[in-house]
Amino acid sequence: MTRFINVILSGVLLFGAIAFSSCKDNNDDPAAPTSYGRTVLVYMAMQNSIGSQGHHRNDSTEIANAISSIPENDRLLLFIDDASNPRIYELSKGLSAPKLLKQWSSDISSASAETLTEVLEYMRTNYTSNAYALVVGSHASGWLPTPTNYSAMSRKRTIGIDVGPDGSMRTDKAANGNIADQIEIDDFASAVLKSGVHLQYILFDACLMQSIEVDYALRNAADYIIASPISISVEGAYYTDLVSKGLFSSDVRDVARTYADYYKGKGSYPYPSESSLDFYGTVISCVRTASLDAFASTFSAFLQEHAASTPKNANGKIDWTMASALNYYPYTANFYFRPHNYDLLNAVEAMGASKAELNILRQALSEIVVCQEANNKFWIGPGYYDFQTMPESTDDWCGVSMFVPQQLYSDNAVNCAYGDLNTDFQHTQWYKAAGWSVTGW
């Protein structure tokens, strides 16, 4: 579905390259305080196929439509990297239009840890605040590392894609024909920490970022991670509502709720009903990172007990049958054999957890998952009509995905863009903290 929002400045679509080639007249600027309540940075890494289709312009316009709803002592900074040189805008109450703060004189990669650190440092230096938050809009694929088998895929999507100067935004390839830049999750976390900004929350308006592997990697970078375990619609968030009702709310759960409300048809702009061919649906949750180490200990105890009582195969590994688990992402050649994204709670049950073990894990999960929202169904693909139905009770799913090692990933490694996913998983911080090695994997 395409949203048509008519916000035009000087005959140029908002945030076009011409409209803000230099700083605007600041006569209508509010008096700038010496410090702010909360500053939210919206980081749009769009020098890629999303940017080639202009979706970030819709998002930018939606943000500008909500400029008057930003609390008086709060600020929203918007970093955009598309076909034009990267730039940063300020949006705040009292401004009649976004104010250009900085524009780079040449292209830089928004899908690099160095750029993320630089932009966060700019926010910290110029907008001293009681709290900071980050919204990331781009392509993504969760915890997965850089692909090793480039011939198996045309794109790689960990966090962000930047094709660079003369690259093909339409195909997500750099000028030399290779796969474009991306940030791996550990590098993303390091970039945030290096900036000196501790984030109240990170909202990923991007695919597949709500996984226990991602959350654990980011546990020291932000207090909350708000994201989706599914492949989200390119439409993403409806930012007019998100700015006015979510991003600056005193309750961080309102960010996830507002995001989901749009897809549930409860937003201020209409979304297609479930019977419509344009319906996509969403799943989103909010994870509290302070409790992740405790959850890792609880999960590790489960794996220790589970491994002691579960037979292993001839290779010394536990074989699980995961067909019954709620799956947020299909394992298919159409999607370059990225792994299944099993709902964590559903996966544990499919792995054979007892009722008592499930109760312990469900209680531990309640300490980290503070909000979970979803449509009754959502698109999973790869076919146009391939939808997944959510369990009726929220006690049966948590909205956070988890990788479960399986033999098929090793058997099919030659066809997978990432090689052996089981081996890749061993390099995650979550693998080590949760003690997965006792399962033989």
Image (spheres, rainbow, N blue to C red):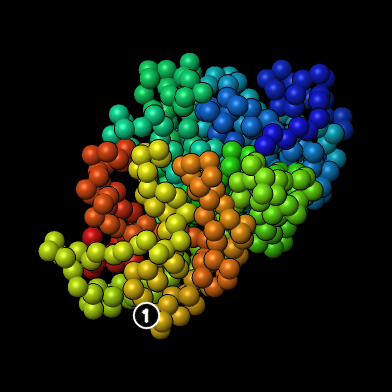
Does residue 326 appear to the left or right of 374 in the view shown?
left
Q: Is residue 68 above or below residue 23?
A: below
Please state which amino acid type lies under the numbered disc 1. Ser
Q: Image quarter for residue 338?
A: top left
Can I make out residue 297 in this image? no
> Is residue 247 shown above or below 148?
below
Quadrant the C terminus occupies:
bottom left
Whether residue 54 appears in this view of the structure is yes
| 79 up-or-down from 358: above or below | above
Question: Residue at image x 64%, y 42%?
Answer: 277
Q: Residue at x 38, y 20 (%)?
A: 177
Front-most of residues 431 and 85: 431
Residue that extends furthest to the bottom in the rendered view of this protein: 356
Mark 1, residue position: 354
Secondary structure under badge 1?
A: loop
- Which of the pair 73/288 is nearer the observer? 288
Going 57% across and 52% down the picture, which residue do you hit? 378
Q: Is residue 314 left or right of residue 86?
A: left
Image quarter (top left, top right, bottom left or bottom right) of the N terminus: top right
Residue 383 screen position, x and y as percent: 48, 41
Please report the residue visible at 37 percent of the width from the left and 80 percent of the height from the top: 354
In the image, residue 257 lies at what x, y percent? 67, 58
Crowding at dot 1, Cα within 10 Å, few <14 / some 14-19 / many 20+, comes out as few
Relative to 374, 178 lies left or right: left
Task: Point out residue 237 in the picture as x, y percentages from the top left corner.
Answer: 65, 45
Among the 4 quarters of the image, the one containing residue 152: top left
